[in-house]
């Protein structure tokens, strides 16, 4: 154990484990996940750094890992070194200003979604006018496909759109922990919650740097003489 152990806490999002940025070029998906978990384990044992997940996110991640063929040994490491904890939704308070901002943002996004829909209707009508009998359906299908993509971007990108995201922020606020994610919506709201946040791609390097520093001699000051 370190002589002066750190007592940092981090709450991890699913996107950390799925990011291609955490893997070396020659690593498989499973090897990258296992190396990350080994680093988390070393940080826990040597630096007293604890990593948490709400059970809702842990369950989601486990399902994804199983679908991708990750072994039970690696899943066992996830269960061992990442602490699952329910956020205390009744005791953690959120400033009213944050709720007001969320309401304003959702109202704005609904309006943006309506504009996307109106644009798609006009495109569909133009396609109908241009098309002859054989191609009309394929043109409309293309408009619908574009509508789905644009609508999803207008309403969901950069916003909290699931209970799992909210659980992550509430747990981080409860534990005074840093949030580790690649989700831009969570990053934005973490700042509003007054939480430290770190891009998932930078997290393995952060832990590695801490572990390397552990083995290096501490700089001396005048009191040491």
Image: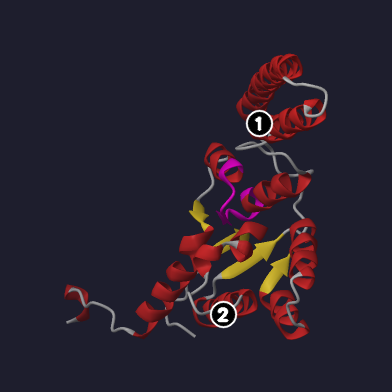
Q: Is residue 97 in sight in this rendering?
A: yes
Quarter of the image for residue 136 reads: top right
Evaluate if marks 2 and 1 touch, with contact meaning CB atoms under 8 Å apart.
no
Residue at the spot 63% in from the left edge and 52% down from the top edge: 172
Residue at the spot 69% in from the left edge and 25% down from the top edge: 106
Q: Position of residue 5 (x, y in %)?
A: 47, 76
**Disc on res. 35:** 2
Residue at the spot 48% in from the left edge and 75% down from the top edge: 24
Q: Position of residue 137 (x, y in %)?
A: 82, 29
Q: How many marks?
A: 2
Residue at the spot 20% in from the left edge and 74% down from the top edge: 221
Q: Is residue 208 left or right of residue 142?
A: left
Is 158 located above or below residue 67 in the figure? above
Is 12 located above or below residue 45 in the figure? above
Q: Is residue 190 left or right of residue 127?
A: left
Q: Is residue 85 in sight in this rendering?
A: no
Q: Judging from the image, what secondary structure is the residue with disc 1 in?
A: helix
Q: Give the mark nearer the N terminus: 2 vs 1.
A: 2
Q: CA distance from mark 2 to mark 1?
A: 37 Å
Q: Which span is picked out in magenta? A: 173-185
Is 190 located above or below residue 111 in the figure? below
The quadrant of the picture occupied by the C terminus is bottom left
Q: Nearer the viewer, residue 188 or 225?
A: 188
Q: Judging from the image, what secondary structure is the residue with disc 2 in?
A: helix
**Disc on res. 150:** 1
Q: Is residue 4 left or right of residue 182?
A: left
Q: Nearer the viewer, mark 2 or mark 1?
A: 1
Q: Residue 198: within the magenta? A: no
Q: Residue 175: within the magenta? A: yes
How packed mark 2 is, by other alpha carbons closer than 10 Å (few <14, some 14-19, many 20 or more), is some
């Amino acid at each position: 154990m370190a002589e002066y152990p750190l007592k940092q806490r981090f709450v991890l999002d699913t996107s950390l484990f799925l990011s291609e940025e955490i893997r070396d070029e020659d690593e498989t998906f499973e090897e990258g996940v296992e190396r990350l978990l080994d680093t988390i384990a070393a940080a826990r044992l040597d630096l007293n750094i604890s990593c948490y997940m709400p059970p809702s996110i842990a369950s989601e991640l486990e399902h994804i890992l199983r679908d991708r063929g990750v072994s039970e040994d690696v899943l066992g490491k996830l269960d061992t070194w990442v602490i699952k904890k329910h956020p205390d939704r009744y005791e953690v308070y959120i400033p009213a200003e944050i709720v007001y901002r969320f309401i304003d943002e959702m109202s704005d996004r609904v309006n943006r979604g309506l504009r996307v829909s109106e644009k798609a209707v006009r495109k569909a009508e133009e396609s109908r006018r241009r098309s002859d009998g054989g191609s009309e359906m394929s043109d409309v299908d293309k408009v619908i496909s574009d509508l789905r993509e644009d609508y999803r971007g207008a309403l969901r990108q950069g916003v909290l759109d699931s209970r799992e995201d909210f659980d992550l922020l509430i747990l981080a606020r409860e534990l005074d922990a840093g949030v580790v994610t690649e989700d831009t919506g969570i990053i934005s709201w973490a700042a509003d919650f007054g939480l430290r946040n770190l891009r998932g791609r930078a997290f393995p390097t952060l832990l590695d740097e801490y572990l390397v520093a552990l083995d290096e001699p501490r700089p001396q000051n005048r009191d040491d003489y």
